[in-house]
Amino acid sequence: MTNNSTLHLQQQQLLLRMEYEYEKEEFKRQTEAMGITHKVRRGLCWFPANAGRTYYNSLNQLVMEVTRSEDTDIEHAFEFGRPVCFFRQDLDGHIHYLNSIGTISYAEENRMVIVMPGAGAVLEVQDIDRLGVQLYFDETSYRTMFEALSDVIRAKDNRLAELKEIMLGHVKAGFRELYPVRFPWLNTTQEAAVNRVLCARDVAIVHGPPGTGKTTTLVEAIYETLHREPQVLVCAQSNTAVDWISEKLVDRGVNVLRIGNPTRVNDKMLSFTYERRFEAHPAYPELWSIRKELRTLGSHARRSTYSEREALRNRMSRLRDRATSLEVQINADLLDSAHVIASTLVSSNHRLLSGHRFGTLFIDEAAQALEAACWIAIRKADRVILAGDHQQLPPTIQCYKAMQGGLGRTLMETIVAHKPEVISLLTTQYRMNEAIMRFSSEWFYNGQLQAAPEVRYRSILDWDSPITWINTSGMNFKEECIGEDGGRINRQEADLLLIELQKYIERIGGNRIREERIDFGIISPYKAQVQYLRSKIKANSTFRPYRELLSVNTVDGFQGQERDVIFISLVRANDTGQIGFLNDLRRMNVAMTRARMKLVILGEADTLSRHPFYRKLIEHLQSTEDSFS
């Protein structure tokens, strides 16, 4: 008889298959139908691109540098581990895709390093004048997730089988009785969460609403766990989240080995990556010289006589054996000396960690990770600690049917629903003025959030309302549907936002903004609106002195960040009350909770108030003096 946990996992397989097929088909459609300009605007493509120098990196991979020719403020989606393909464009505009598929080693704003499949691929790409590079469909991530789900379904009479039944079935999670550890620098709920993690035998959850110090709490839990265990695995869904937690651990003096390259490429971040540590190992110079000699001998072998080739083969065989033993030695040293192995969930399948087990796995931003991705790492662990907030950004799902079927429901959400005893909720937030926090607290967190005394009344200007809704009803603003993917834009609302932003900057005073480094965030759920706002700010000389203090991005782009002042453009304005993307209230929760001292929302109340969330928010602000205009 098939039990509940197995049925659940089989359903996950089915939904993941739907997402896989949809994404693959969508990639094919984009490749064939979507124009280059549109792909560039969406951050999926660099064109024109330049092929630069090639070399063998420390891991003996043939890599090529690629730069994009045009200086642009469009954010791209290229990052470590993602596959890319190359194309050339004829003078008549026709696109020809090349056969070679590369993998990104690391990417900066306008430069990336790509692992190439061979010398032939390099030659093919380097000869092209009108070169382009675009993201390729990522088979590897899906293959790894399917493999993990199959392993969990088959698991029997081992620790993975036990964790499966505890997390998905009816088996209770166990806790040890330990004497509580005091952490005077943490608040009471943070301290209780760390102690709950230390006591957990199987699973624990640190639920951290915005500004409640989830990362601080998680770092403390990891640090304290390392007093009891020699090594832990720390994962997250995105490279950015892995970078963030890794940096905080390094600041605490923890020896972190980062599998994969960071998204923000700087010396501090790079210094604890696997590649840099590999290069810094005392045995590496010998390994490098052996590899260099092997490449030289290989080219000689192709031009030598039969008898010479035999001698060269023997020499090369001995060198390869020595290179392999050196590589094994370096990898073992790096792995054994690290206290924390940090990677994305998919990268936890890295060959370096093959067969390696960990006492504890920490998954940060667990509410943004697909369940299948979590199981990739859980296979290697004896107990699991998840941290995140399921009332903020969910995983990105492209297939509507898969979403409807529950693919977006994360492992963290499933455990929260059935195992409330494993949750530690952090309730004191240190980011927002209390008035900005209040509505989110009531709607999403049962009114349990409290503002710390030092931020409760924080503000920039005296007698200023901390939260304001600028109602565009009656202004005849209308949203437009643009582009092949039906993106939304509301130019009049964007123009009004910039007028209001300029007024607020003038009220504060330019000198004060620059001296105190008061920063501003402009958020819209729609990429088209974000790009329009960016271009208008770039063209407006009034904003030039504050350019580095102004960030414009989508809600997803602001996840985990905060600013002194936040302006939100909701875009939707129509006669039918359609709000599309804004139906995902968790995104709105993220947007509203980025502000420390001032939040300004622009939106058409007539359109938005047909939804109960926005109606309640508008009523809440109307009851507060000067908050609704």
Image (cartoon, rainbow, N blue to C red):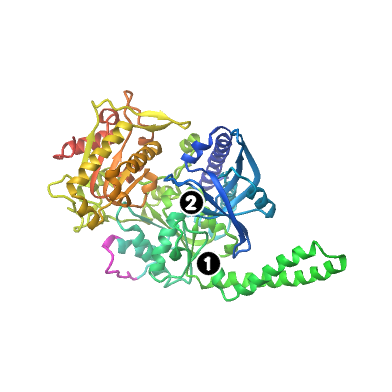
Whole-number angstrom distance, CA of label 2 to CA of label 1: 22 Å
Q: Is residue 199 visible?
A: no
Residue 447 in the image: x percent, y percent? Answer: 24, 47
Across and down, in percent, residue 126 comes to 63, 50
Q: Is residue 629 visible?
A: yes
For residue 424: magenta?
no
Q: Residue 25 falls in which quadrant of the image?
A: top right
Whether residues under marks 2 and 1 lie with C-beta atoms below 8 angstroms apart, the answer is no
The boundaries of the magenta stretch are 179-189
The verdict on residue 188 being magenta is yes
Q: Is residue 7 above or below residue 277?
A: above
* Residue 505 image point, x, y percent: 22, 46
- Pointer 2 or 1: first along the chain: 2
Question: Amino acid under label 2?
Answer: Asn
Q: How many marks?
A: 2
Nearer-the-camera pick, 261 or 2:
261
- Please give the residue where the numbered disc 1 appears in the rendered image: 276
Magenta: main secondary structure: loop
**Is 38 in front, or is 146?**
38
Using residue 199 as the reference point, say whether residue 135 is left or right of it: right
Q: Can you identify the residue that label 2 sits on?
A: 110
Please state, as top left, top right, bottom left or bottom right, where the N terminus lies in the image: top right
Residue 613: where, in percent of width, then height?
29, 36
The secondary element bearing badge 2 is classed as loop
Residue pictured at 48% horizontal, 72% vertical: 230
The crowding category of the residue bearing disc 2, from other C-alpha atoms within 10 Å (few below 14, some 14 to 19, many at least 20), is some
SS for callout 1: helix
Of residues 419 and 579, the one drawn nearer to the viewer in this rendering: 579
Amino acid type assigned to the residue bearing label 1 in the image: Arg
